Image (cartoon, helix red, strand yellow):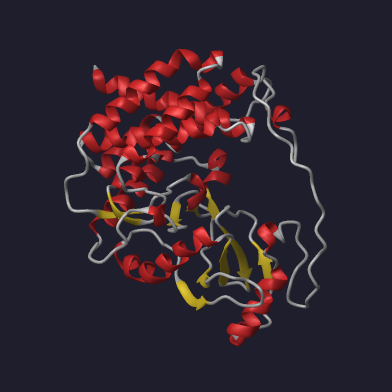
Amino acid sequence: MPRISSCLSSHSTTILSPRAAVAEVWRRSLRSACFQTTSRPFHPIAPPPRSATTIDDPLDGRAGITASLVQRLIDSQFPRWSGLPVKPVAEDGQDNRTYRLGHSLTARLPTAAAYEQGVAKEDRWLEELAPALPLEIPSVKARGRPGQGYPYAWSVRGWIPGATLESRQEEVADWDTIAASLGRFIQALQKCDATGGPVAGAHCWFRGCSLHRYHDETMQALAAVRFDSRFSSAAASAAQVWTAALAEKEWEKPPVWFHGDLSAANLLVGDDGYLVAVIDFGTCGVGDPACDLVPAWTVFAGSARRRFKDAVSQDAATWARARGWALWKGLITLADETRTLQARSKAFAVVASVIEDHQLHLT
């Protein structure tokens, strides 16, 4: 993997998306900063036993989950799919490991006990939510159980063609349309019947709950970043945004469905560059939908942000709480010295955008 500093040449002529352009400004301003990433020693792991149906891949073996393990689970629990090639996906998250299973299926395995409850939620609710939503969401084909030394429930899903928006940001030509599509998706999700749905709580890391849950963490993050000269001047403004978000009235309507993690990594685009699917509902629940408005600052900018806001159509109090959610996410990333320079510079851009948006609403 190339060093981040080698990717920040001031002579680059690449045309960037609005969000990437803002982040690039921050990256360049931070090149001389004192941010240091922590290097972790690499400990080679013995390769798993070879199988005729597994494919050697450098992505294999993360979190102790291997293609060989997936193959054994499939063979023992779903023999009808034995013999299908098993290969890790190129783009994967931290909570779960996903493997391609032939051409039309995937196996999804949580990496820790804390994420197993997300699998149970998806198994229970995705099928009911799907018909009412304008974009594709994962479909559960089978529910796996612990076995072969693997201790958690897991699942077989349908494969959704596409690439994450995170990996295609520089290729997107029509951000406004993507923003409107996501806004309509969120609105449709909120209209789904929430009867009996998983009430927001620990299972979704308190997304959909009150922002007060994250007050101490936000204050600690603010204190941690005040020392940096590039951010100290904005610290007071960030604190004002947070105070305003906490002061707003809580969600007073009946609780509604929310996704909980609408990052660019969980949005899939097709070959035409348009949004086709929303994935990873492990943090979904029923409660305050303000957390789902965060893409206004983490994904979109300029006219796309306006299109997103128009499509979602929420009240001012909910948008104020949403700014609080986005600020919290940006600050904890910024304060985390183990994160890469690229990740922290993007967090800087998010915080700056939230502050600017808050100030516009004061005028």
Question: The N terminus appears in which quarter of the rendering?
Answer: top right
- Please state which of residues 2 and 221 is positioned toward the viewer in this rendering: 221
Check the image and name the residue furthest to the left.
253
Residue at the spot x=35%, y=41% of the render? 213
Check the image and name the residue furthest to the bottom.
80
Whether residue 10 is visible, yes or no, is yes
Instruction: Measuring from the top left, give residue 323's x and y in whole percent.
Output: 34, 32
Instruction: Measuring from the top left, give residue 21's x and y in whole percent.
Output: 53, 27
Residue at the spot x=59%, y=70% of the render? 151
Instruction: Measuring from the top left, give residue 166's x and y in whole percent.
Output: 54, 44
Whether residue 20 is visible, yes or no, is no
Question: The C terminus appears in which quarter of the rendering?
Answer: top left
Residue at the spot x=45%, y=50% of the render? 274
- Please state which of residues 74 and 161 is positioned toward the viewer in this rendering: 74
Specify the quadrant of the image occupied by residue 179.
top left
Total tally of numbered discs in the picture: 0
Specify the quadrant of the image occupied by residue 320.
top left
Specify the quadrant of the image occupied by residue 341.
top right
Instruction: Measuring from the top left, give residue 319's x and y in whole percent.
Output: 27, 35
Query: From the viewer's perspective, is 287 left or right of 176?
Result: left
- Please state which of residues 199 and 304 is positioned toward the viewer in this rendering: 199
Residue at the spot x=32%, y=51% of the render? 186
- The answer to whether 191 is drawn above or below residue 249 in the figure is below
- The answer to whether 361 is drawn above or below residue 85 in the figure is above
